[in-house]
Image (cartoon, rainbow, N blue to C red):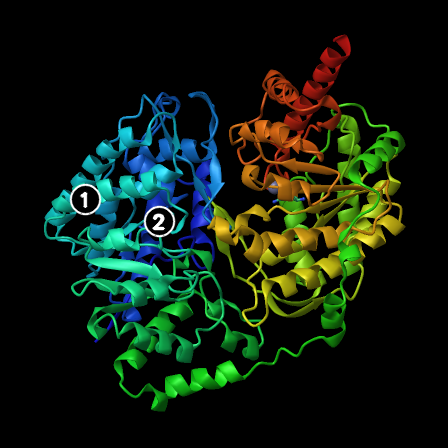
Amino acid sequence: MSKNSIVGYPRVGSQRELKFFTEDYFKGAISADDLKKNAAALRKSQWLLQKQHGLDFIPSNDFSFYDGVLDAASMLNVVPQVYKTLGFDELDTYFAMARGYQGSAGDVKALSMRKWFNTNYHYMVPVLDGTSEIRLNSDKPFARFTEALSYGIKTKPVLIGPFTFLKLADIHGNIDAFAGDMVKAYKKIFDQFNVLGAEWIQIDEPSLVTDLTKKDIGLFVSIYSDLLTSKGGLKILLQTYFGDIRDVYTNVAGLGFDGIGLDFIEGKKSLELVEANGFLSNVLLFAGVVNGKNVWRNDYEKTLKLLHGLSRHVDHERIVINTSCSLLHVPYTIKNETGMAEYCKNHLAFAEEKLAELSELKALFDDGDYSAHPGYQKNAALMQDKANEADAVIREKVAGLTENDFIRKPAFSEREKLQKKSFGLPVLPTTTIGSFPQTPQVKALRAALKRGEITQEQYQTDIKVKIAECIALQEEIGLDVLVHGEFERNDMVEYFGQNLDGFLFTQKGWVQSYGTRCVKPPIILKDIRRSHPITADYCVYAQSLTKKPVKGMLTGPVTILNWSFPREDILKEEMAFQIALAIKEEVMALEEKGIRIIQIDEAALKEKLPIRRADWHTDYLDWAIAAFRLVHASVKPDTQIHTHMCYSEFEEIIEDINAMDADVISFEASRSNLSIVDALERANFKTQVGPGVYDIHSPRVPGVAEIEAAIHKMLKKINKNKLWVNPDCGLKTRGEEETIPSLKNMVAAAVNAREKLNRI
Ligand code: GLN
Ligand code: ZN
C-alpha cells in the first residue's frame, strides 16, 4: 500500500477567521489568550478534517500567526536587539518584527518582507549579524505536536530547514559562521521530538531548487552530514518544492534522509533525475503530484501514469502521494462557493478537495486495475469535458501581432524632453502609487452594492464623492501628480478580472499574501476580452476636479496573469497577450479622454521570474516584457506611461525592466537595502524612478527628516531630473490617520530637498 501526505495546509481559516482574530488583537479588542484559543480551535478543526480524509502524514507547525520563516527566526532566537529592547513577551516581540512597533515602549521598523520564491506569498527576512545568538528559544513546534496528540493525531512536524533559513536571511558576515549554531539548535529540536515520541519530521528546503553554487552545495552537505547523526529514532523527510533539485540530487542520496520530497509539477527534471540516478531503496519518495499552486482538478490518468512510472524505481509501498508544495497557495474549499456554476465547481479542487483527491489517488494507485474504478472514470470524463471554446477573434488578433505592435515611438529620450516641457512638474515630483485608504465606509459601500441594498447609480455617485474628497485632500497635501484613489476597486487584479470577459470569481477563495492580508485570485477560465470601458469614467471625473495631472490607473497584463490562477490548457504567453490587448484598449480610451499620465502596474512582474536563471528569458521575460510593451506602444509621445513594481529586487533583470520602455517606474525600496539604486546607476537606467521613500506595509508614520534623508541618499546616485518622490506601494490597506500625516511629511521632505538642491 502506498501512503499520502500534504506539505502544509492554509492557516487563515476558511472564512479568514485568523485574520480577523489577529487584527482584533492588534486593535486591542481581544486578549492574547483569546487570540491563542481561537487559533487553537482553528488548528483542531483542520487536523480533524485531514484525519477524516485519511491522510497518512498530517503536518503540524505549518500554522503561523504571521509567517513561517518569522516563526523559525523567533524559534531560533534570531531576534534583532531592537525588538528585544522593547521588553515584550514572545508573541508581541514576534508581531513587532512582523509589523514594526510605535508606542510607549519604542519606535522600531518591521523586518523586511520578500516574496516567497515564485509565489505571491511573502516571508519576513531574518537578520543575522555579529550580535545574533542562534539557539532554540521557543517550544512552539513541540506544543503544536502535543496539541495534535491530544486529539489522537500523531503529526509530522514541519520546520523550515537550516539551509533555506540561512539562504533566505540577510546575513551580515560569513554564512558558514552561523551554520554551526543552526545545527546545534536543530539537534536540540530533534532531541525534544525524540522525547515526545514523534516519528517523522519534515524539513522544508525549497532553496535546493534554486541554482546552487559549489559553496552552497558544500554548506548544505556539511549541515546535514552533521545534523543527521543526531536524529536518534526520528525519521527525517527532506521536503523540496517549486522546482527540481538537479544540483544536489546525488548529494542528497548519501546523507541519510528517510524520506525525500520532490516536486513533479514544477520540477521539470524531477522525473528525469529519478530515472537517470535511481532512488535509494530504503527511503520514502514523497511524490509531489497534486498541484499545490493551482486550482484545477488533478488529471488522474496523467498522475497515475507518473506514479506507475516512478514505481519502476521505487517500491510501491515507499511511494507517498503528496502535494507539490504547501496548500497555503490555494483557497480552502469549493464548498464555500455557493454562487458558482456546477460545471465550474466540478473542474476545481481547492485545499479540501485536494485532500479528497489524495485519498482517491491512493486508492487508485493501490488498485492494480484502476480503470474500472468509478472515481477514475468520473475523472476521465471530466478531463474530456472541455467547454472552453476558443474566441476566434481574440486568437486571430494575437496570432496577427507583428514586431511594430511592441515598439513605442519616438525613443525614450525624445519623449522625456517633450514630457518635461508639457507637464512642467517641479524637480522631485511627488505622487502616490494609486490607492488611498479603503475606509470601513468605502468597504461598506461595496458590500451594500453586492447585497443589492443600493443601486449601481447610487454606488457610483457615492464613489465619486470619495474621489472628490481624495482630490481635495491631495491638493491640500500638496502632491504634484494626483490619483483618483481606487475606491471602486476591492483588489487591483480582481477589479479588472471582473470587468473583462473570461475570468471566474470565487466568493471565499482567499489566499494568504502576507501576515493577515489575503487576496482572492480570479481564475482564468476562457479567452480574455474587453467588452466594455472600465476605468475612464472615474478617472476623467477626478481629472475634471483639478488642474494638476491625474494618473489613470491600470493593472498590467503580466500582473493580472500572475495573480490569477492560470488555465492549464493554453500557454501563459497566449493568456498574457490576450490580457495585454484588452488593457491596451483601456489605455487608448484613457488617452482619448484627455488623461495624460497612465500608470500600468506590474506589481507582480518579478514574482514569477523562473527560479532558475536558464529559464528566465525563454520561459518568461521574452513574452512578459513584450506583453507590457504591447499595452502602451501606441500612445502619443507626450502621454507619460508609469509603471509600479512592488519589490525592487529586480537588479538582476534591470535591462529587462528598462526594456519595458515605461517613462517612470516606482517601486518598493524602503524595506530592502538601497542596493537597487547602485544597480540603476551601473545600468545607466534611462527610465525615471520613484523608489519608495517610506514603508506603507507598517502603520508607522515616518518623520520628515527620515524621509528627507532617504531622498538625499537616493540623490547621491540618481540624477535629480530622474527622481520621483512617492511611498513604496498603494495606501489601500492603511488607515487615514497614518496616511495623511505620512504624506504630509513626504511632501515636506520633498520641498526641503528641492530647496537644498536649489542652494547648490
Ligand atoms: N495601484 C495599486 C495601488 O495603489 C498598486 C498596488 C500594488 O502595487 N500592489 O493599490
Ligand atoms: Zn506595490
- The image position of residue 542, as x and y in percent, is 82, 43
Q: Is residue 518 above or below residue 439?
A: below
- The image position of residue 256, as x and y in percent, is 17, 53
For label 1, the residue is 225
- Marks 2/1: CA distance? 16 Å
| Picture quadrant where residue 370 is located | bottom left
Characterize the local packing of mark 1: few (<14), some (14-19) or many (20 or more) Cα atoms within 10 angstroms. some
User: What secondary structure is found at the residue carrying circle 1?
Assistant: helix
Q: Residue at x 17, y 46 (%)?
A: 228
Q: Residue at x 86, y 42 (%)?
A: 637
| Picture quadrant where residue 180 is located | top left
Q: Farthest top residue?
A: 759
Q: Residue at x 13, y 44 (%)?
A: 230
Of residues 434 and 689, the one nearer the viewer is 689
Q: Is residue 343 left or right of residue 574?
A: left
- The image position of residue 204, as x and y in percent, is 31, 50
Q: Is residue 678 left or right of residue 514?
A: right
Q: Amino acid at mark 1?
A: Ser
- The image position of residue 728, as x and y in percent, is 61, 34
Q: Amino acid at mark 2?
A: Leu
Circle number at residue 208: 2
> Which quadrant is the N terminus positioned in?
bottom left
Circle number at residue 18: none
Of residues 625 and 347, the one nearer the viewer is 625
Q: Is residue 624 above or below residue 693?
A: below
Characterize the local packing of mark 2: few (<14), some (14-19) or many (20 or more) Cα atoms within 10 angstroms. many
Of residues 90 and 347, the one nearer the viewer is 347
Q: Is mark 1 within 8 Å of ligand 2?
A: no
Of residues 407 and 175, the one nearer the viewer is 407
Q: Which mark sits nearer the N-terminus, 2 or 1?
A: 2
Q: Is residue 432 above or below residue 54?
A: above
**Res 119 visible:** no
